Structure formats: C-alpha cells, structure tokens
Amino acid sequence: MKFKAVDWVRKVRDENYEKSKKLSPNEKIAHTKKVADIFAKKQSRVSSTK
C-alpha cells in the first residue's frame, strides 16, 4: 500500500481550514495554543515511556 503524502497533507489542511474558517484571529491563536499543548502532553508521555 502506498502512502500518498500530498493527498494526506491536503486532506489535513482542508479539515483544519473547515474547523477554523469562522474563528476570529484571537480564537485561532487560542485554538492553536490548545492543540499545541495537547500535542506536547502526548509527546511527553511517549518520551517518558522510552
């Protein structure tokens, strides 16, 4: 099975756009920070199990 990177990137980008297109600039910043915090927490759990 081939992984189609360009198709995946477009899909993720389009999904993110749909989720954020109605947000104000401040709301987009807050959302980005929230998502980054969640990602960082997941990464720290993965890193601590190695």
Image: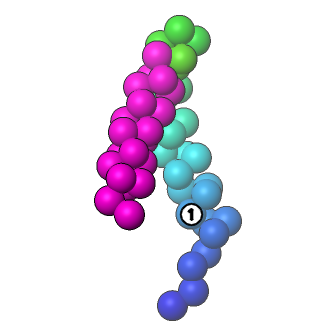
Q: Where is residue 13 in the image (x, y as percent from the top left)?
A: 58, 47
Q: Where is residue 16 in the image (x, y as percent from the top left)?
A: 50, 39
Residue farthest right in this picture: 6
Comparing 7 with 46, the one in front is 46
Apparent side of residue 25 relative to residue 19 in the rendered image (left or right): right
Q: Does the magenta stretch include residue 34?
A: yes
Comparing 25 with 47, the one in front is 47
Q: Residue at x 36, y 53 (%)?
A: 48
Q: Is residue 17 magenta?
A: no
Comparing 46 with 23, the one in front is 46
Instruction: Name above or below for residue 36 compared with residue 44.
Output: above
Quadrant holding the C terminus: bottom left
Instruction: Name above or below for residue 16 compared with residue 20.
Output: below
Residue 19 visible in rendering: no
What residue span does the magenta drawing correspond to?
30-50
- Residue type, mark 1 in image: Trp
Comparing 46 with 10, the one in front is 46
Instruction: Name above or below for residue 40 compared with residue 29.
Output: below
Residue 36 visible in rendering: yes
Q: Which residue is drawn at 41% across and 25% down?
A: 34
**Mark 1 = which residue?**
8
